[in-house]
Amino acid sequence: MIKEISTLEELKSSTNVIRKSFITVAEELGLTVQNCPTNPAFLDESDLLNKKENNNISMYGLFDECNQIGFMALERPSPDSTVFYLERLAVLPEYRHKGYGRLLMDYAFEAVRKNSGEKISIGIINENVRLKSWYVDYGFKELEIKQYPHLPFDVCFLEKEV
């Protein structure tokens, strides 16, 4: 079941899901709170709360019975934008490779369509070859790769029409 995250307790649970999901890649790539403090593996629940309060963003949790096992957020940068940003797509490591990420993606595409959106855009760590492959296999097209001085990796921007 996928539902919108609305309570403080759900935000706390979502923060834990995000951290546990992103830490595996952070460890693989040698990311630490010192060299990459903005990585979701080091997310603080206040960061998620601030994002929800200050942006035009919807947050969703994926639940297996009562346990949250996944998360994603969709941001519409402006009320008239037809491009939505997918953020923090996360599935707990023990639930990966079982189709849950695809469930979240399908839900995201339906939500964007219902809100008159035309595309979903995402930025990922370019060096995460497995994840990049997953998005490309799902139909995303690579737009560009950018380097940012404050990040120890390149960012790959991908996009897909809904």
Image: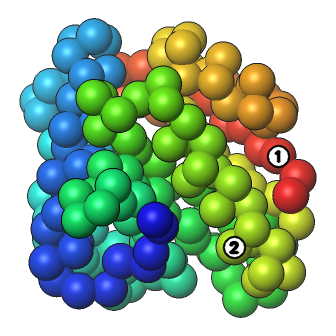
Q: Residue at x 29, y 38 (%)?
A: 92
Quadrant of the drawing holding the C terminus: bottom right
Question: What secondary structure is found at the residue carrying circle 1?
Answer: strand
Q: Which residue is mark 1?
A: 160
Q: Residue at x 79, y 81 (%)?
A: 114
Q: Residues within 10 Å of mark 2 (few under 14, many from 20)?
A: some
**Nearer the observer, 62 or 12:** 62
The kind of residue tagged 1 is: Lys
Residue 3 pos. (x, y %): 44, 75
Q: Earlier in the sequence, mark 2 or mark 1?
A: 2
**Nearer the observer, 103 or 158:** 103
Res 111 label: 2
The residue at the far front in this view is 65
Image quarter for residue 143? top right
116 in relation to 124, above or below: below
**Nearer the observer, 28 or 13:** 13
Residue 38 pos. (x, y %): 27, 45
